[in-house]
Image (cartoon, rainbow, N blue to C red):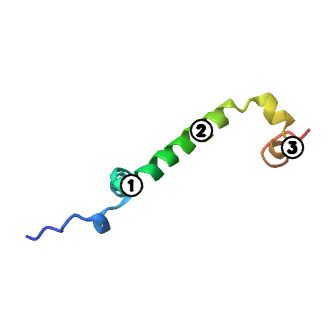
Amino acid sequence: MTEKALNWRNLRGISAFMFEVKHPGTRPFAIGFGCILLASTYAQFKYTDEMKANSEYWQAFHATEKK
């Protein structure tokens, strides 16, 4: 029985993602990606119904009831 050598080419999905996050060369990118993810999530949850009602973009593309 032979075992495959575990290297980055054999990784798939979450294990490949975690390998890249832990790699020292991509750590600054991973930190930046995490910051942008948190900031965009915060901004999306902060977007109130009143803001959506006053937004031309939201009314044009997402609203079910047009103004």
The amino acid beneath tag 3 is Glu
In the rendered image, the quadrant that contains the C terminus is: top right
Question: What whole-number distance in Å separates the C-alpha atoms at marks 2 and 3?
Answer: 23 Å
Question: What whole-number distance in Å separates the C-alpha atoms at marks 1 and 3?
Answer: 38 Å
**Mark 3 = which residue?**
56
> Dot 3, how many residues are within 10 Å of its Cα: few (below 14), some (14-19), or many (20+)?
few
Q: Which mark is residue 17?
A: 1
Q: Position of residue 33 (x, y in %)?
A: 51, 48
Question: What whole-number distance in Å separates the C-alpha atoms at marks 2 and 1?
Answer: 21 Å
The amino acid beneath tag 1 is Phe
Q: Which mark is residue 51?
A: none
In the rendered image, the quadrant that contains the N terminus is: bottom left
Query: 38 above or below 21?
Result: above
Q: Nearer the viewer, residue 38 or 4?
A: 38
Rendered image quadrant of residue 19? bottom left
Q: Nearer the viewer, residue 52 or 1?
A: 52
Rendered image quadrant of residue 51? top right
Task: Give the mark, 2 or 1, whose residue is nearer the N terminus.
Answer: 1
The amino acid beneath tag 2 is Ala
**Pointers 2 and 1 in contact (C-beta within 8 Å):** no
